[in-house]
Image: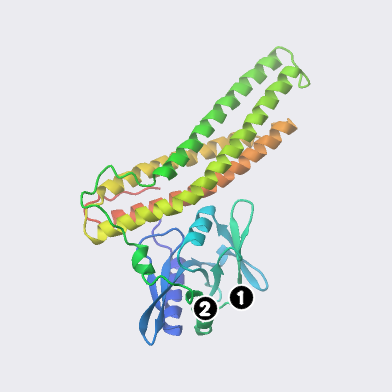
Amino acid sequence: MPRHNSIERIGVSKTSLVIEEDLNWIFREQPIADVGIDAIIEKSENGEPAGKFIAAQIKSGDSHFYNKNKYLSYYGITNIHYNYWLNLNLPVILIAYLPSTKTCYWQIINKKTLRKTKNKWKIDIPKTNILDSKSITKLDELVKEIKTQNVFSDFFKYDYDSEFSAELNILHDSIESININKIWIRKFSKSLSKFRNKHNDFQERGYTDKSAEIKGNIKQLSRFCLTVSQRMYNETMLFSNIFPDEFHLAEKLTYSLIKNNINTTPIEERLSSLINNWKSALTRINSLKKVIENPEIKYPTLKKSLKKLADSLDTLHTEFNEAYAIIKKLHYYICNSNPYVNKRSYK
C-alpha cells in the first residue's frame, strides 16, 4: 500500500504553518494514524502552552469536496468517524486544504454540522471559514469550556502490565461483530442456493410463476432476505460504535509499548491476523453483492428485498473497509517503529 501522498503532506504542512505562524498556537501531528484525527492543536498564551486542545482532521485535495458557491461539502464521513468524533473529550474540527487556491478552510464537527446521507455523513464548510489569524477568536471559543487540563497526556496514556501477554486480545468485540456478519452472509448464501435448487426443480416439473410452490419459494427467500438485511445493518451500527474505542485502546497501548522500547511482536501478530480476517470479510461481502445484484431477477417482491440487502451490504462494506484501512496503518506504524518486529506489507 502506498505510504506517501504529497497532497496530504502539503495539506498537513500548510495547516501546521498557519497554526504556528498565524495563530502562534502549537501544532502536534499524530504519531500514529488515528480514527480521523491527524493532529492536536494546543492554544498558546504569551508563548506558553495553555493546556487547551482541539483535535483536527485534515483533508487535502480539491477532489475530496463538492465545491458550491458558499460551501465546500465533504461526503466521506463514515459512522466510525461520526461516533468517534462525537464521543471524544475534545472539540474536533475538519480542515480542508485546497491546492487550487492554496487555502485552508475549517468547520467545527458536532451534531449540528453533521448531516446524514444514505450510508455516510456529510458536512458543509463555509468558504468564509478560512483558517488564518482571524480564526483565533472562533477557535478560542471552542477551547474555553474544556475543563480537563491533561487531555493531551491522557490521549495516549496507557497503564500496561509489565508482564505483557502474547494472548492480548485487542479489538475483541469488533472481531466478534465481523464474525457475526460473516455468519449471516454464509447463512444467506446457503438459503439462496437452496432457493435456486428448489426453483429449478419446480420449473423442470412444469410449475409456472403463478403456482403456489414458486410463489411460496420466492416469499420464503424474500422474508429471510429482509431478516438478514436488518440483522446485518444492526450489527454494522454496533460495529461502528465499538470499533473506534477499541482501536483507540490498541493505539494507546502500541504507542506506550514503543515509547518504552517494549517488544510489540505479540500485538503485531494479532493485527496481522485481524487484517487477514478483515480482508476475508470484505471479499465475502463483495462476492455476495455481485450475486444479489443480478439484473435477471424478475420477481418484484424478491428484487425489493434483495435491494434492501444490497443497501445493508453497502453500509457494511463502507464501515469494514474504513476499519480495515485504519488497522493497516497501525500495523504499518508498528512494523516501522519497533526493531523487534519483522517488516510486513499488505496490499
| Local crowd size for mark 2, using a 10 Å CA cut-off: few (<14), some (14–19), many (≥20) | few
Given residues 127 and 230, the one toward you in this image is: 230
Total numbered badges shown on the rendered structure: 2
**Residue 1 visible from this viewpoint:** no
Question: Mark 1 is on which residue type?
Answer: Lys
| Residue 316 at x, y percent in the picture | 54, 44
Location of mark 2 (residue): 141
| Residue 156 at x, y percent in the picture | 34, 62
Q: What residue is drawn where x is 60% and y is 51%?
A: 119
Q: What residue is drawn where x is 30% and y is 45%?
A: 168
Given residues 71 and 112, the one toward you in this image is: 112
Q: Quadrant of residue 333?
A: bottom left
The relative height of residue 191 versus residue 347 in the rendered view (above or below) is above
Given residues 9 and 50, the one toward you in this image is: 50
Task: State the mark number for residue 127.
Answer: 1
- Residue at the extreme right of the image, as rendered: 210
| Residue 216 at x, y percent in the picture | 71, 22
Does dot 1 land on a helix, a strand or a loop? loop
- Residue at the extreme front of the image, as rendered: 147
Q: How is the image coloured?
A: rainbow
Q: Quadrant of residue 30?
A: bottom left
Question: How far is disc 1 from disc 2 in space, using C-alphas?
Answer: 19 Å
Task: State the mark number for residue 174.
Answer: none
Side of 52 where 189 appears, left or right: right
The relative height of residue 88 versus residue 178 in the rendered view (above or below) is below
Side of 253 where 278 appears, left or right: right
